[in-house]
Image: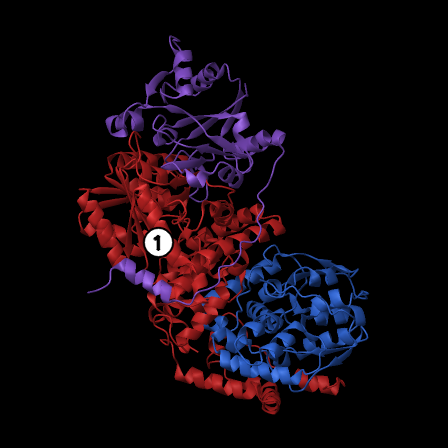
Amino acid sequence: MAADGDFAARAHAALGNAEVRANFRRAMDGLMAKRAAQFTDPQAWAQTRARGAAIKRRVLARLPELLERLEARCEANGIRVHWAETTGDANRIVLGILQEAGARTVVKGKSMVSEEMHLNAFLDRHGITAVESDLGEYIIQLAGEMPSHIVMPCIHKNKGDIARLFAEHIEGQGYTEDVAELTAAARRVLRSKFAAADAGISGVNFAVAETGTLVLIENEGNGRLSTTLPPLHIAVTGIEKLVETLDDIPPLLALLPRSATGQAVTTYVNMISGPRRDGEKDGPRAVHLVLLDNGRSRVYADAELRDTLRCIRCGACMNHCPVYARVGGHTYDAVYPGPIGKILTPQLAGLDAAGDLPHASSLCNACVEVCPVQIPIADILVRLRREAVRPSDTPAVKGAGAKRAPLEALAWAAWRWMYATPALYRLGSRLMARFGNRIPERLPPLNRWTGVRTRPRFAGRTLHDLARDKGYDDA
Amino acid sequence: MPANPTPPAERPHTVYYFGTCLVDLFYPEAGLAGMELLRREGLRVVFPQDQSCCGQPARNTGLFEEARAVARTQFRAFPEPWPIIVPSGSCAGMMRVHYPQLFADEPDRAEAEAFAARVYELTWFLVHALDVRLRDTGEPVRVTWHPSCHSMREMGVTDEPKRLLRSLANVELVENPRERECCGFGGTFSVRQPEVSGAMVADKIAAVSATGAAEMLTGDCGCLMNIDGAMSKAGTPMGRRHIAEFLMERCHGR
Amino acid sequence: MMPDARTAILARLRAAPRGAAPELPPWTPPVYAPEDRLTRFRTMMEAWRGEVHEVDSATWPDRLRSILHNKGVRTVLHAPATEHGRRLAGAWAGQAEAPRLLAYDRPVEAMKDDLVHEADAAVTGTLGGIAETGSLILWPTPEEPRLMSLLPPVHVALLARSAIRDTLAATAAEEGWAGRMPTNLLLVSGPSKTADIEQTLAFGVHGPKELVVLVLSDL
């Protein structure tokens, strides 16, 4: 088997950066402890996550009907709904709305879908400036980087990194590592951006089909500002981000922030059910909702892979992932890192482009244990490993079969023959036990094992033989 | 979701032992110790010579046909309705949790489910089915426990091995605050992502060593092979063994 | 002709195998004894670094004046067409040491500078409170717009003690929110905060730096 290429190369670089590793380790330890403190009653946790999972499974079971219902309710509330097949389409829709309104500057609340669209770069090419206003997103925008975590985008940076960035980019700002001062500097800069913005763009945590409501949660208030102060609000979201009823919101809110950051509730829960009405003094005069597919309907087509779409983007899977904690978010080279990224990215981008991701896991199940909507991440990883080498019939994953390796297949055929033929296995294992230690260490995969370990020592005699000698019955 | 097994309705007279392929080749003494522990509880222990591997390597690679072929070999090797005891949470998890999934659309689904329902992890079985009482005959020693991911998260084995260790009068169990973190083995993961796996096992050794224990015990020889190999390379002066061997030595002097 | 995106997406979703919709398993949000609600609310709100003051319904404007005086607040945004807005204006009228009142009585476009830069604090009512999470329920109206609770550095919220409920789930269901959602409905649990820099808490990153809750005794 081949050492897995691109991910391994990027991991090599990440593992060599002691500072970034320490940043991640400290952050992940803190987040795990805070989450654990929120779910101390195992029965309550089991009950709430079972409810959360069922809510999302019900949504997926009736996704087309609920999307139509959401659209109708939003339109009745005055929210214009747009549908986009691809990120390119979504970008063009957003640009069209902005151009029609004559908008030149945009403030953005946090939105992973807009990252998926690479919206800022697109708008920039069309003469529209988009400023990220979530503090973490603002920091990485200044640094010209991608988020390294879906909830805490600049978690890879420490105070010193941020102090240098601010001193360099913010006029009149000296070098300081004081977090309160850094935060105040960002407030000062971004306040004026909010006041001057022609439009606000946000994501959506939950879209409620029953009421045509967009639910956004956050701690900073930049999401509220982006969706309240400018005259135009555009929300972008994936087609899977909806729930059926308003009653579905409380249990999901009981899961999302506690799983994400160990908070019982975020500072703000912002429920938007329409633009400013007659007589109201603030709020945007127009609200648009862009529903993005970008491969999600293809994920949906497979009954097992569909579970991927339950995700509520809490990030608990990455916070608890021993691989993510060591290599950090950028190693995944994708908008969605960590375990959820390892199953989502190959399905959206294709196994030909991201087929090494499903193998970048020890299948330890830590993510499965904490997922608040019970996504069987490990099973989906294995399914994607399968699709990469042995595609199922329609509907297959994009790029299925891209990792076919005839030599490897041959080795597995031999393995099967030996392990499924008892007499052959006994002979083979006896020979291995006796002579295995003579296998040269330079041969793969042994050479990839011995970098940090001594080689395993074959025992000389197998348990089969020892058991027989000790008089254990065979039947 | 971890399996939530219930012990057999009655204390069995006979049990099967599934040694696992790693134990077969690398740690047969550990396998033998598990069988001895069961035998000394008065059970007849049957070791079918036709057994080989649970099929997990193929399944985790996505090669379900190969995994099923090897699994079927085990169905034939363990025909009687006796409990199947496994000295590995990972192999037990493969058989208990994944066989039913793997055979969901197969004609022999019922056979797979019946087989899966008979599978128990060794320490869990000692505690819940046999209610073992251990008498410590050894010198005072300080040990720490390394649980495997699949024993915890697939087989629901959490406190059982520690309970066995705590019941030994002269054994002090020092818990590793990072014990729930993967050691980085992950089967083919260790050679597909050698550097990430290497970083994980290096951290594991550091955390295990920080307990100050003289010896690390585990219930899974996959983890053991990984941690043992890394400790040897790093020259870590700490004992490491399968828990079955340790219990045999403490209580039965070998 | 290519089908439009909506048609194409919905067609693909409809072509996929239908899964059965599972029943919702039971989920029971917590219930508190009526006398425990305020305690729980206060504990949680204080955990979010909100200030909670129990005040007398008859004299709260005086109490508020001294609280704001201690914070150095000079200009207070208020909603003149609400009952509490009128109370405030009436009580503070002619008091030399009372902060200057700024009325939110025009559309945001007409007073953006004042809202963004001038007001040191704002006083709003609330629809109620949530004991479980220490949250305020804000239901902005034409008289009391959305931005009041967001732009000034200090947000003062009036909360009737009897309006503290157990949970969001119970409140939304009992009050039939689903049939009458306003353009914007908010839950607010403490002042604006961030932990984006090394998980270190900092307050007032975008919204209010301080949240003052006046719990009004019932008449």
Q: Residue B143 appears in which quarter of the rendering? A: bottom right
Judge by depth and name the residue closer to the eye, B121 or A65.
A65
Q: What colour has chain C? A: purple
Output the letter for the chain in red: A
Q: Compared to A420, does B232 lie above or below?
A: above
| Camera sees residue A451 | no
Q: State the residue at coordinates (32%, 20%).
A: C103
Q: What colour has chain B? A: blue
Q: State the residue at coordinates (76%, 76%).
A: B36
Q: Residue C90 appears in which quarter of the rendering? A: top left
Q: State the residue at coordinates (40%, 58%).
A: A63
- Residue A147: give x, y in percent of width and height: 36, 52
Amino acid marked by disc 1:
Glu
Lateral position of residue A10 relative to residue A366, left or right: left
Report the residue marked by disc 1.
A68
- Residue A452: give x, y in percent of width and height: 51, 69
- Residue A290: give x, y in percent of width and height: 30, 51
Chain under disc 1: A
Q: Residue A342 appears in which quarter of the rendering? A: bottom left
| Camera sees residue A295 | yes
Judge by depth and name the residue closer to the eye, A297 or A211.
A211
Judge by depth and name the residue closer to the eye, B244 or A57.
A57
For mark 1, does the 10 Å Cα neighbourhood hold few (<14), some (14 to 19), or many (20 or more) residues? Answer: some
**Quadrant of the image containing the N terminus of chain A:** bottom left
- Residue A391: give x, y in percent of width and height: 40, 76
Q: State the residue at coordinates (50%, 27%).
A: C51
